[in-house]
Amino acid sequence: MHSVITSINNAITLAQRLREISKNIEDAEFKNVLADLSIEMSDTKLALAQVTEENAELKSELTKLKHSRGESQSDLIFKEFAYYTDSDDGPFCSGCYDSKKQKIRLSPVTGHFATFGRFKCPSCEQRCG
């Protein structure tokens, strides 16, 4: 992307040099075409700058979305039967995280059903612990 901006800057510089040369030429049509070329290159440079800025914003949003979905492996640690954060937040379902990269918090199971596992995933209904 940087090379495209550099090329456009070089083209604008060349158009400016042509404008200087054209001062010695009395051909009005040449001067009009040169002016149109300069305007088109400036418009292209502005459009490219906007696309570059939008691209950076979208990359930032994508990174935030991946992080919120738990796709950053470094923020989860597997302990015993589930995933936890560095600050010991959790447990999160290992099945949902491993297969769909979703951080689904496990719910505690009480009563007679606790013999099948102390925790249950509300999404995939896996029991563990």
Image (spheres, rainbow, N blue to C red):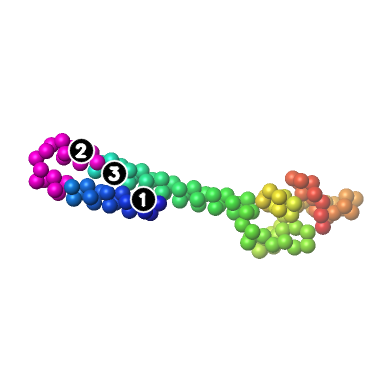
Relative to the observer, which residue lies in front, 66 or 13?
13
Residue at left offset 28%, top offset 40% = 40
Res 44 label: none
Res 33 label: 2
Secondary structure predominantly adopted by residues drawn in magenta: helix
The Cα atoms of the two marked residues, 3 and 2, are separated by: 12 Å
Q: Evaluate whether residue 111 shows in this view.
A: no
Q: Quarter of the image holding residue 77? A: bottom right
Of mark 2 and mark 1, the one earlier in the sequence is 1
Relative to the observer, which residue lies in front, 9 or 114?
9
- Does residue 103 lie above or below 86 as drawn? above
* Circle 3 residues within 10 Å: few <14, some 14–19, many ≥20: some
Q: Which residue is mark 1?
A: 4
- Does residue 119 lie above or below 43 as drawn? below
Q: Which residue is mark 3?
A: 41
**Amino acid of disc 2:** Val
Question: Does residue 124 belong to the magenta stretch?
Answer: no
Q: Quarter of the image holding residue 94? A: bottom right
Q: Which element carries disc 3, helix, strand or loop?
A: helix
Of mark 3 and mark 2, the one earlier in the sequence is 2
Residue at left offset 81%, top offset 54% = 128
Relative to the observer, which residue lies in front, 18 or 128?
18
Q: Quarter of the image holding residue 34? A: top left
The Cα atoms of the two marked residues, 1 and 3, are separated by: 12 Å
Q: Which element carries disc 1, helix, strand or loop?
A: helix
**Amino acid of disc 3:** Met
